[in-house]
């Protein structure tokens, strides 16, 4: 009984922290329609800045209440200012860009902030001081409970109340609510959108900073805080309904308690549990608990993609030359370089498979690594538990990925936009949790080792040729499918769902099939990846892997068929080189991504195509 | 004469608002039937119940004797109902010809093909349909860049791709110049006569209605208040009172 009470209170305390971050995220989304990946970074910065302020206090203030609480508030304000700078310098320039590009840009910010924090604060975990006035614990209902946790429990509802007052009792708040409902209308009424957006960003960033800096007395400050919180905050915001503050509060309570009691009752599947709840909520209520369908954006409707047309001759020539070079490569390169090239080919197929549903299908997947990973695990499990030969493993890879695609896709393709993307993320996290926590079968964090090719393919160049045939072959088949009637049916549903239905196209079935085809292709890539590395770890289906795929597709350009190929080569090549050349590869990578979003919004292949057309 | 569409006492309410109440009518092959009424009369609701976008609360819709009440729009289309929209709905990332080709591919159940490029399927058939609506010269252009009046013609070609028995046209001439309007509806009328297609259209432009419709039905506040030839409807005092107003009688 006491345990239950303590867990319930713990759950409430984490719910408060989660709500602070999620509230900022949801307010920013409501107005600007930007899904801010960098919100976790602002949270982390809040913790770091707060730590610096508290530990560098001048003589008289160090250790005092005024010093501590002053530092907390100042840290939140500083993070708010940082958020404003990000908005003014970067996001303001891309409000008209497609949703995914905005996401990409904010992910660039995540990478930059990670390295900046590493440079300033170093890699070690930092411990903050205890909070003055709130040290020790209080006895409640016969249970001793830390005072600081109690304080956090109160902070959540207080902030919700203050925000409610701000949004319902001030002119500014009324404008923000109006812009959340229909920003074109607000703009047409003569409201200065720029100032409104910047101030909203300040508020959102400040809330994230406050959430982060309030963690100081609770846990150590480290460089993993950003991605850890952002996934949870996404879940909270989506479950609550994008743009809804009470929804975010409700969802934060739900998720916080789910975590707390999950550990008590079902420690094995806590990670799955959270995402399972999210999946159930989204299937039952496609716009979250308290969310509503937002008014469609009128002004910023993106221009339709250009028609596909036949492959231009120079591109065929360039492709043929590239293929010839690849065939000759093993004769000229050393083993290590052949391995790198093998991996590049695998990523080309991985990116092409995601592009298949993102480009022609118009569905963004934040969890495409699930199918890549399913392929890798499918091959590895067969090899480990049944001692299957490699070709059988390579056949099992797309089969398992395809089954997963059929199962997950059935849910994901029902929703649209950000909600669909978040559901793909949820399913990918479920898959990741299974790989991570089902230790008996998957080896958990230790992964599965010793997944090597059979004797005949152990030579690096033989495996390279095998990869070349499978990856380029499958990528070309996908390209072919886009030009075939199936690809047109898929694009028809994306271009105009109303018209597609009115000419007998069953959009759901077409998208579901496309999702499955993409999963199968990703599975082939994953299977090859397992054998090329000789091992499989849960990270094969982790979020960073999914983000890699997104980056490749967006870098190359969603609208062009060659985009994913160019993007995969550029991204994987750049990352490989940067990681070898410098410790600060994230900083450079992030800056490159931001620059690309600002200067090549159609991606690399899109930019080339445009220049060619002139 | 064959009865193509038979609508029997359909009803639809939204909350407390009874948008359509017990409306019945039918259309013959080759006939141009205009559905008119003031704003909010229930025209669009009525329309959307015919092709399956809305399910009626009560009543029956029969196509060539077959009950199609509440079927999904794509199934209704498969049974031979073409549709154009008030705000044109085409595929912006495809050329004009490809737009028609997709409809032809769908009609032939060939969408689940993964190999031969789509532009190689039914190109001649698509061109023939485009020629019929006067869009042959623009077949290669992207639909996303067409003028509005041209888009309306493309939509008509798409709607004809499944050799429909019935065409449902929701405000087919909205947003077009007056001369273009008459031309489009005259073209529709010719095609309908030629191929025995029944056409039901809603329209605000009375010049178009009285010039092109064989018969008119008038809706007011969800009820059918008049039905008959253009001359009869024009002379109907109830219609004059609720809808046409003094202007048309005296002008």
Image (cartoon, rainbow, N blue to C red):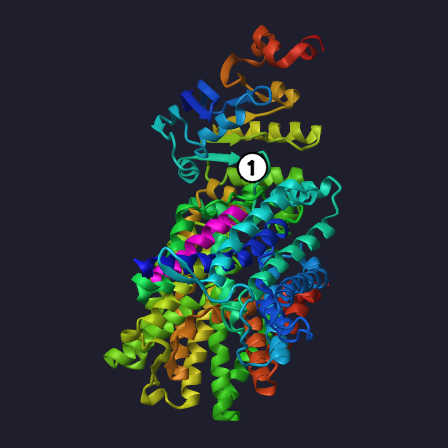
Which x, y percent locates residue B117?
49, 59
Q: Main secondary structure of the magenta part?
A: helix
Residue at the (51%, 12%) spot, across then down: B225
Residue at the (67%, 46%) spot, across then down: A299
A529 shown above or below B92: below
Confirm whether residue B112 shows in the render.
Answer: no
Name the chain letter of the residue that bears numbered label 1.
B
SS of the residue at dot 1? helix
Mark 1, residue position: B156
| Image quadrant where one finds the C terminus of chain A | bottom right
Task: Say if the magenta span includes residue B69.
Answer: no
Which x, y percent locates residue A253?
44, 53
Span highlighted in magenta in the image = A240-262
Quadrant of res A185:
top right
Which x, y percent locates residue B109?
40, 48
Residue at the (65%, 71%) spot, across then down: A53
Quadrant of res B132:
top right
Residue at the (32%, 63%) spot, across then down: A264
Confirm whether residue B226 shows in the render.
Answer: yes
Residue situated in front as seen by the camera: A496 or B138: A496
């Amino acid at each position: 009984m006491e345990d239950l009470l303590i867990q319930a209170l713990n759950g409430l305390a984490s719910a408060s922290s989660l709500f602070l971050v999620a509230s900022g995220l949801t307010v920013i989304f409501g107005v600007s329609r930007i899904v801010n990946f960098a919100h976790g970074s602002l949270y982390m910065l809040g913790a770091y800045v707060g730590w610096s302020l508290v530990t560098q206090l001048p003589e008289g203030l160090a250790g005092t209440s005024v010093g501590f609480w002053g530092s907390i508030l100042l840290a939140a304000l500083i993070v708010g200012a940082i958020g404003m700078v990000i908005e003014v310098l970067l996001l303001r320039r891309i409000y008209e860009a497609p949703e995914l590009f905005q996401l990409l840009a904010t992910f660039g910010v995540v990478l930059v902030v990670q390295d900046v924090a590493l440079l300033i604060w170093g890699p070690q975990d930092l411990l903050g001081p205890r909070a003055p006035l709130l040290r020790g614990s209080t006895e409640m209902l016969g249970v001793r409970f830390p005072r600081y946790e109690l304080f956090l429990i109160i902070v959540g509802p207080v902030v919700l109340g203050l925000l409610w007052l701000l949004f319902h009792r001030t002119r500014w708040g009324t404008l923000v609510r109006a812009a959340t409902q229909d920003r074109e209308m607000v703009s047409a009424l003569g409201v200065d959108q720029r100032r409104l957006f910047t101030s909203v960003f300040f508020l959102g960033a400040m809330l994230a900073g406050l959430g982060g800096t309030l963690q100081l007395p609770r846990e150590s400050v480290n460089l993993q805080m950003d991605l850890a919180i952002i996934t949870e905050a996404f879940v909270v915001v989506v479950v609550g309904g994008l743009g809804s503050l009470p929804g975010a509060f409700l969802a934060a309570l739900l998720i916080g308690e789910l975590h707390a009691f999950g550990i008590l009752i079902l420690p094995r599947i806590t990670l799955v549990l959270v995402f399972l709840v999210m999946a159930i909520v989204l299937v039952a209520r496609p716009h979250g608990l308290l969310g509503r369908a937002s008014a469609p954006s009128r002004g910023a409707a993106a221009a339709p993609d250009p028609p596909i047309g036949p492959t231009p001759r120079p591109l065929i020539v360039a492709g043929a030359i590239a293929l010839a070079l690849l065939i000759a490569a093993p004769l000229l390169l050393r083993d290590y370089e052949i391995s790198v090239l093998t991996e590049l080919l695998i990523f080309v197929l991985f990116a092409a498979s995601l592009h298949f549903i993102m480009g022609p299908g118009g569905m963004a997947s934040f969890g495409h690594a699930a199918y890549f990973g399913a392929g890798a695990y499918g091959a590895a499990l067969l090899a480990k538990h049944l001692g299957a030969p490699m070709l059988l493993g390579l056949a099992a890879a797309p089969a398992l990925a395809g089954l997963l695609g059929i199962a997950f896709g059935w849910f994901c393709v029902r929703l649209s936009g950000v909600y669909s993307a978040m559901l793909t993320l949820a399913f990918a996290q479920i898959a990741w949790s299974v790989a991570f926590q089902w230790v008996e079968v998957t080896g958990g964090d230790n992964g599965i080792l010793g997944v090597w090719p059979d004797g005949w393919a152990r030579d690096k160049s033989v495996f390279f040729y095998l990869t070349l045939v499978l990856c380029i072959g499958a990528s070309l088949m996908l390209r072919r499918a886009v030009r075939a009637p199936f690809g047109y049916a898929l694009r028809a549903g994306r271009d105009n769902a109303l018209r597609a239905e009115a000419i007998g196209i069953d959009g759901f079935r077409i998208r579901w099939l496309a999702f499955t085809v993409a999963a199968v292709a990703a599975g082939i890539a994953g299977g090859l990846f397992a054998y090329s590395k000789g091992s499989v770890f849960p990270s094969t289906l982790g979020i960073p892997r999914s983000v890699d795929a997104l980056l490749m597709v967006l870098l190359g350009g969603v609208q062009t068929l060659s985009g994913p190929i160019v993007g995969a080569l550029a991204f994987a090549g750049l990352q490989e080189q940067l990681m070898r050349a410098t410790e600060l590869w994230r900083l450079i990578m992030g800056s490159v991504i931001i620059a690309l979003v600002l200067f090549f919004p159609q991606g690399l292949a899109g930019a080339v195509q445009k220049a060619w057309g002139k | 004469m064959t009865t193509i569409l038979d609508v029997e006492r359909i009803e639809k309410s939204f909350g407390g608002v009874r948008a359509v109440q017990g409306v019945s009518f039918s259309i013959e092959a080759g006939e141009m039937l205009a559905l008119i009424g003031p704003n909010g009369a229930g025209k669009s609701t009525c329309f959307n119940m015919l092709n399956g976008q809305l399910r009626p609360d009560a009543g029956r819709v029969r196509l060539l004797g077959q009950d199609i009440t509440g079927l999904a729009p794509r199934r209704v289309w498969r049974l031979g109902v073409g549709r154009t929209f008030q705000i044109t709905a085409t595929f912006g990332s495809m050329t004009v010809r490809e737009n028609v080709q997709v409809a032809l591919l769908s009609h032939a159940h060939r969408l689940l093909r993964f190999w031969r490029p789509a532009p190689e399927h039914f190109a001649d058939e698509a061109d023939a349909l485009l020629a019929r609506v006067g869009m042959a010269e623009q077949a290669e252009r992207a639909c996303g860049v067409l003028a509005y009046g041209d888009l309306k013609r493309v939509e008509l070609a798409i709607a004809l791709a499944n050799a429909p028995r019935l065409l449902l046209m929701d405000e087919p001439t909205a947003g077009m110049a007056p001369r273009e309007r008459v031309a489009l509806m005259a073209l529709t009328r010719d095609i309908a006569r030629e191929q025995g297609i029944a056409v039901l259209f809603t329209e605000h432009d009375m010049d178009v209605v009285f010039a092109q419709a064989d018969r008119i039905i008038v809706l007011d506040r969800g009820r059918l208040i008049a039905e008959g030839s253009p001359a009869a409807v024009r002379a109907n005092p109830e219609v004059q009172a609720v809808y046409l107003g003094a202007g048309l009688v005296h002008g």
